[in-house]
Image (spheres, rainbow, N blue to C red):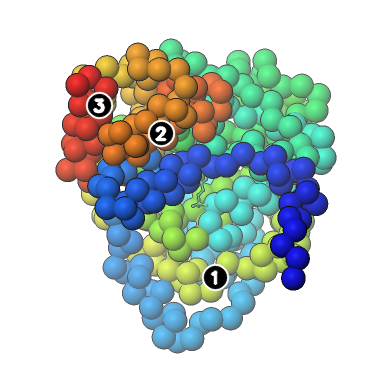
Amino acid sequence: MSHLSTSSSLSQRSVNIPPFYVMEVLESAQKLEATGRDIVHLEIGEPDFPTAPHICDAANQSLASCNTRYTHSQGLPELRSAIVDDYNNRFGLDLVPEQVLVTSGTSPALMLSFMALLDQGDKCLLPNPHYACYPNFVSALGCHSNFAYTSEENGFGLTPGLVSENLDPETSAILINSPSNPTGYVISSKEMQGIAEIAESEGNIPIISDEIYQGLIYGGKDHSILEYTDNAFVLNGFSKKYCMTGWRLGYLIAPLDCMRVLQKLQQNFFICANSFVQEAGIAALRGPQDHVDRMVETYDERRKYMLKRLKDIGFRVGYEPMGAFYVLADASEFGNDSLEMSRMILNEAGVAVTPGIDFGDGAEGYIRFSYANNIENIEEGMKRLDGFLNG
Ligand SMILES: Cc1ncc(COP(=O)(O)O)c(C=O)c1O
């Protein structure tokens, strides 16, 4: 058998895709751990809480009943009903289950939304900083990202004014993400309404709204774009709010007249989401929610502690996050190359953090810290950082 490389035949689109740096940091940290090093993980956006027992029980029972076959491509009807009941109750909407497509995590829902809305060469307006993977999905489809640079003074907020300034005739979709990764920014009702109005007045441009951190907020109220427009593709999932990252369960809510196209894409690419995992999703939505409330209280305590310690250490935090579980801190006091800084912090201090550059050039010089880790580990991480940067 020939061992000659075939990599020269790989498509440029796939070769050019940048890595998801946070996963690279995690993998480097794990490599160090395998050699016996103790690493504090403040990089990964993964809840440290276990999935609630009633959710695990539902999956176990489903497996015990041998629910192991394909489901409807749009998802189990009971799960789709639970999803619309949840959205309708929280936001006063009148969605119907036929508007829901259940996916294996929010990531495939993102992919399906971009595929459904963008033709080759089209543009998608994105905030910068942004969740690392958005522009990579867009460019993998032969499309382009139009970045709307948000500013720290404005709390990294994507405002109606910024959206309006960055639209052009090729813009086929506008992406918003609230609460946001990596900034923790929560878009206000007024701003969301303003963005919806601009999208409508500029030719009814659809809004892709990534609402995966909904429910993880520290004061005030979060909103869904569906309160302000029907012309939206809403993504949400179970990874963060229900601590179900490894289960891979998410969903897409879209206008009824787009569902057939989305269903065909799902049938071809993914067939359906895991059957017994969907049963667990029903239990998550229909079951008790007090574990979520307790988790949010705990995140809030960690958030306050981390903000204080980061400032003591010398990071500048111009915006205090009000949602999700991240702090995006200005590290320019210590250097300008966030990738190099995060490598040094990992190798020298034994703390895994995410370089700002993962979230776009608007976050270069910043480091993202995740407080999805217990307080003892966060305390240890801050102690090590202080020692390394100021010792
Ligand atoms: C903003 C945002 N969207 C989507 C995802 C993907 O989530 P999932 O695990 O549901 O695929 C993440 C994961 O970190 C995220 O932060």
For the residue marked with disc 3, what is the amino acid? Answer: Phe
Residue at 47% of width from left, 22% of height from top?
A: 337
Q: Secondary structure at mark 1?
A: loop
C-alpha distance separating marks 1 and 2: 37 Å
For the residue marked with disc 1, what is the amino acid? Answer: Asn
Q: Secondary structure at mark 2?
A: helix
Quadrant housing the C terminus: top left
Relative to 377, is 140 on the left or the right?
A: right
Check the image and report above or below for 268 versus 26. Answer: below
Give percent across and percent down for residue 115: 73, 48
Relative to 73, is 245 on the left or the right?
A: left
Q: Secondary structure at mark 3?
A: helix
Disc sitting over residue 274 in the figure = 1
How many C-alpha atoms fall within 10 Å of the one at disc 2: few (<14), some, or many (≥20)? many
The answer to whether residue 121 of the structure is visible from this angle is yes
Labels 1 and 3 touching (C-beta < 8 A): no
Asked which quadrant contains residue 322, the reply is top left
Residue at 47% of width from left, 29% of height from top?
A: 339
Give percent across and percent down for residue 20: 54, 42
Asked which quadrant contains residue 61, the reply is bottom left
Residue at 72% of width from left, 62% of height from top?
A: 3
- Give the foreground label among 1 and 3: 3
Q: Which residue is mark 2?
A: 343
How many C-alpha atoms fall within 10 Å of the one at disc 1: few (<14), some, or many (≥20)? many
Give percent across and percent down for residue 281: 45, 64
Q: Which residue is mark 3?
A: 388
